[in-house]
Amino acid sequence: DECYAELGWDAWDGAVVPCILSDEVSGGDLTGLLSVYSLSKQSNLAGYRAAFAAGDPQLVATLVNTRKHAGMIVPAPVQHAMAVALADDAHVAEQKDRYRRRRDALRTALEASGHTVDHSEAGLYLWTRRTDLDPADATAQDSWDLLGELADLGIIAGPGVFYGAGGEGYVRVAITATDEAVARAAARLTARGPRTG
C-alpha cells in the first residue's frame, strides 16, 4: 500500500520515496509483488475509492478477473477523475504543503509540551510519547494515560496500542484536521507547556 508515497517527511522531504516495483527495491523481479496505490492521500479523494494496482502480471490478471466477476469495476466518472488527478502534480504539491504546515505546527506544539515525536518519517500522523517515558518501558496504560491528557485539552488522537505492542506508550496524532482546528490544538498544547509529573 503506497498511498503515502507523496507524503515523505524529514529525510524523505524532496526525495522520491521508492516504489516496491522500482529496480532499487525489487531488484528487477516483480514476481509476487503488487503495488497498490490510492489517490486518497495525495489528491484527497478518499471517498472516490480511486486506486490502482500494478506489479506481477499474474497477480494483476487475477485481481482484475476477480474484480470483474464480483462486479467491482471502477465507474467511468471515477476513472476520469483519476486520470485528471494523476496528470496534475500542482495539486499534489499544494496538498503536501498544507499537510506540512499542519505537521510542523503540531510537532512544534507537541515538543513544547513535553512530547517526543518518533517514527513519523512519512504519512499523515505523528507518533508521540511523553519525553519522560522510555519506549522500552512503555505499557498499554501509558498510551491510554497520554490519550487522556490530550483529551483533557480537547485533542482527539488514537492510542498507540490499537496498532500493536510496538505502539505501547504512544498516541497517534493526525495532521488531517482543518488548519483552524490544528491551530487551536497547537495553542492548547503550547499554553499547557511541558508535563510536570
Image (cartoon, rainbow, N blue to C red):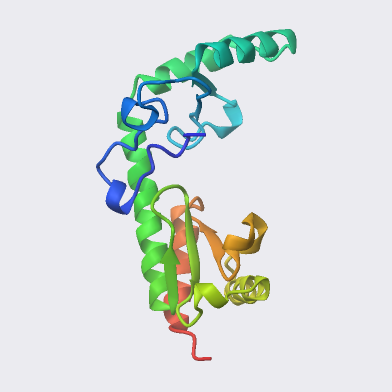
Q: Nearer the viewer, residue 123 or 66?
A: 66
Q: Nearer the viewer, residue 189 or 164?
A: 164
Q: In the displayed image of the protein, which residue is found farthest to the right?
A: 70
Identify the image quadrant of residue 138. bottom right
Whether residue 34 is visible: yes
Residue 123 vertical position relative to residue 192 in the rendered view, above or below = above
Residue 135 vertical position relative to residue 20 in the rendered view, above or below = below
Identify the image quadrant of residue 112. bottom left
Residue 117 locus on image (x, y percent)? 42, 66
Identify the image quadrant of residue 95. top left
Residue 84 locus on image (x, y percent)? 41, 18
Residue 122 locus on image (x, y percent)? 41, 48
Q: In the displayed image of the protein, which residue is found farthest to the bottom?
A: 197
Q: Nearer the viewer, residue 181 or 131?
A: 131
Is 148 on the left or on the right of 8, as rendered? right
Q: In the displayed image of the protein, which residue is found farthest to the left?
A: 14
